Structure formats: structure tokens, C-alpha cells
Amino acid sequence: MAVGKTFVVEKVCPICEKKFRVVKTRSRIMVVKRDDDACIHYADFNPYYYTIWVCEHCGFAADEKTFTTKMPDRHLVILRAVLLTKNIKIPFTEERTLGNASTAFRLALKFLDLIHGKSSKKAKYAHQLAWIYREAGDWDQEKEFLTKAAENYEDALMRESFPIGELTDNAVMYLVAAICHRIGDDKKATTYLSRLISDKGVREREPRIHDKARDLWGDMRAGRKK
Ligand SMILES: [Zn+2]
């Protein structure tokens, strides 16, 4: 169990305006390893289970930033029309199961669709849900959400302006390549990796992305030879 790794706080839901409980994770949890697509594995605890907050009263689900940033009125109108008429109750659980966590992500993705939310956010949710299935060893579900993540990252590359927070367009191109390699689309992975590796600007300004792209390229070539 996650004893000492989480704590409960109360927040006010922007949709129903009631107080609801949120499980937050403490920062000191031990990292075991990092995958090439940025998934972090932690010792006997998975903080990705808790990245999506769910209001236990109305069922609204989203990440912390969405809950704590003022929401545009047009989004409130759409979400309230759906949530406040349906009486969705999602029971609060201090310790989430794989099922609870996946429901939270699926709801969050559904609400993003309703408000025509940003592809970069859909990509992030789908990517983290894929990581949850990775840890659980469910490849079919992992692959489904990796595919969704890659599609939405690519859409974000075309439509959104970068950087988004600390995420640069080159970092997203690298992520798409890493995901494509995992789901067996090495052709697309190669396209993005060769762009990153041959771009002098990336090498100079984002050497970490350049190095990661080189490493993944090397892994892919080694894999092909096997
Ligand atoms: Zn609510």
C-alpha cells in the first residue's frame, strides 16, 4: 500500500463548486528507471495513478492545472450542461486501483473531447494512461493509448505554438519517434529522428534531445540487425 506516499487535500470543483477530496503524492518516491518515451518507473508505487483529479460529486476529471486554473466560460457552460444534469457519482478512493486510474483518465479524455481541448493535453493524458497499462503488463491497452498519444502529439505539432510549458516542438518530435518505435512504426520514427539528428539548431540549443534521438536511432539500428 502507498502508506506515507500520499496525502489527502480538499479542493473546490470548478464545475459543481462543491468541496471534493484529492489524493496528492509526496515528492520523495524512489525512481527505478526511465523509459525512452519519458515514462518513469518508481519503487512499489505509481504516481501516474493520481495525476487525474476526479470530483466525487459531479464526476469532472482533469489534471491539477485544469482544476486550479480559471476555466473559460464557454467550457464551463458545456461541462456543466453535461455533468450537472447527469448525476454522475464517482466514489472517492484514497488508494486507486488500475481500474480507478484508467476510469479517471478515460473521463478526462472524454471531457477534453467535449470542449474540443488541446491535442497536446489529450496526448499527455493518453500517454500517461498507456504508461499505467505498461506497468500492468497490458500491451493491447498500452498500444491503443500510445497510438492515440502519437496522433495527438503530431496534431499538436501542426496546430499549437511551442513551447508548451517546458515542452518544445523538438521534444515532442522525439516523443513521437519513441512511441512510433514502440508500436512498430519504425518508418515514422526514422523520419522524426533523422530530422532531429540532422538539425544543427537542435544539437546546439537542445543537446539532450539530440543525444536521446541519437541513442534511440542506435537502438533501432541494433534492433533491426538482430
Ligand atoms: Zn464537481
Image: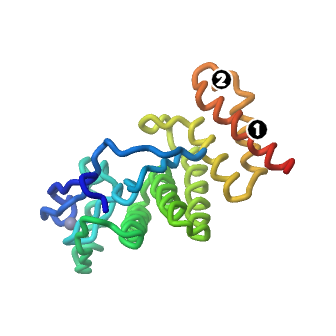
Q: Which residue is mark 2?
A: 203
In the image, residue 161 lies at what x, y percent? 50, 38
Which label was assigned to residue 125? none
Looking at the rendered image, the quarter that the N terminus falls into is bottom left
Identity, as a three-letter code, of the amino acid under mark 1:
Gly
* Residue toward you, 107 or 217: 217
Q: Is residue 177 left or right of residue 92?
A: right
Q: Quadrant of residue 79?
A: bottom left
* Residue toward you, 26 or 70: 26
Q: Residue at x 25, y 69 (%)?
A: 93
Q: Quadrant of ligand 1?
A: bottom left
Q: Which residue is mark 1?
A: 218
Q: Is residue 54 left or right of residue 37?
A: left
Most distant residue in the top direction: 204
Examine the rendered structure and indicate whether residue 137 appears above or below residue 208. Answer: below
Q: Residue at x 36, y 66 (%)?
A: 104
Examine the rendered structure and indicate whether residue 6 appears above or below residue 107. Answer: above
Specify few, some or many for label 2: CA neighbours under 10 Å numbering under 14, 14-19, or 20 or more.
some
Q: Residue at x 37, y 69 (%)?
A: 97
Q: Secondary structure at mark 1?
A: helix
Q: Name the colour scheme.
A: rainbow
Identity, as a three-letter code, of the amino acid under mark 2:
Arg
In the image, residue 39 lies at what x, y percent? 51, 49
